[in-house]
Amino acid sequence: TTKLSPEKLLCQLRDRVNVTMIHGSDGPFNTSEWQKYLPEKNLSQEVGHFRQCAVVSSAGALKSSHLGPEIDTHDAVLRFNGAPTIGFQSDVGEKTTVRLVNSQLVTVKEQKFLTDILYNTGILIVWDPAPYHAEIHQWYRKPDYNFFANYKEYRTRHPKQPFYILNPKMQWELWDILQENSLEDIQPNPPSSGMLGIVIMMTLCDEVNIYEFLPSKRQTDICHYYQKYHDRACTMGAYHPLLFEKNLVKRVNQGQNELIYTHGKVTLPGFRNMHC
Ligand code: NCC
């Protein structure tokens, strides 16, 4: 493999990763039953387009970062899964524009997805690990977590809150690019929510600042900024090819390297700002 320039790599991401949400016209969702639940507007019709966006990882290294005010200056902020803002504003900010959640969180009862008010702010997007390049019908019959019933229940309870299902083909289009640009064979599991969220925001924003995805000097074994749980795999990856995701993001970073160390901050261009 020859090493692509950062510009070429960014163009590959733009041109090969189709970021789309399931729409009522996509079989097997093109039934009258599903029309009641899926949002009518597509994501970019719903939100328009943003100038500067922030993606906030859930890493323990955000603790005591004091990055909250900087994060809140962005036009839109993406957060993941159950990552809270209340009680952590000074480190992670208080704005939530989009929240990307995995299907396990939506499905497993203990996670309280249906009842925790944390999820009632912003636009929700759920994704589920699909088999490698599976056809959408095949995935629909056998999702990794069967989140469809809880998706419908949430939509019934909060019909006004936009809530999308990420088209599962995106994860493997992205995975192929990760694999092609890595020297080793990477595990055949989909990218983390973090990496998916970064690419989603690149479609909506002129510029994307990512916080504590590449760890700063505050790097720690503490998994999340909001929990006491210790596990190095949270930062390095086990199931998800997290290390390879981070290497790729490092390669295309347009910000100063020093800002990775001090702020855990990386800057990527939005797709519309790229000349391929
Ligand atoms: O932990 P998680 O991820 O919710 O974190 C969101 C994203 O932040 C980045 N991250 C997180 C912690 C850390 N120390 N370093 C990081 O870089 C990663 O990019 C990560 O994707 C997920 O990706 O959906 C994940 O979800 C959790 C868990 O399901 C949810 O938090 C809901 O409880 C997974 N953990 C477990 O299943 C135990 C995690 O593997 C991946």
Image (spheres, rainbow, N blue to C red):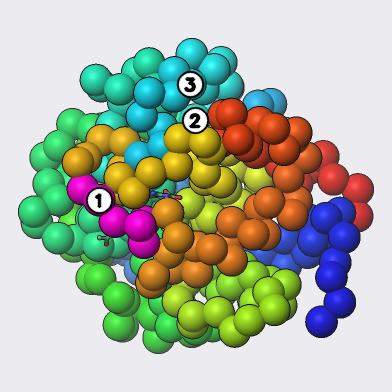
- Depth check, front residue: 127 or 255: 255
How many numbered discs, if any? 3
Which residue is labeled 3 in the image? 67
Which residue is labeled 1 in the image? 230
Residues in magenta, as a range: 229-234
The percent coordinates of residue 250 (x first, y second) are: 68, 51
Q: Which mark is residue 77?
A: 2
The percent coordinates of residue 180 (x first, y second) are: 71, 77
Amino acid type at circle 2 is Val
Mark 3 beta carbon near ligand 1 (under 8 Å): no
Q: Secondary structure at mark 2?
A: strand
Q: Is residue 263 left or right of residue 111?
A: right
Amino acid type at circle 1 is His
Q: Tell me if I can see residue 40 in this picture.
A: yes
Quarter location, residue 115: top left
The percent coordinates of residue 269 (x first, y second) are: 75, 40
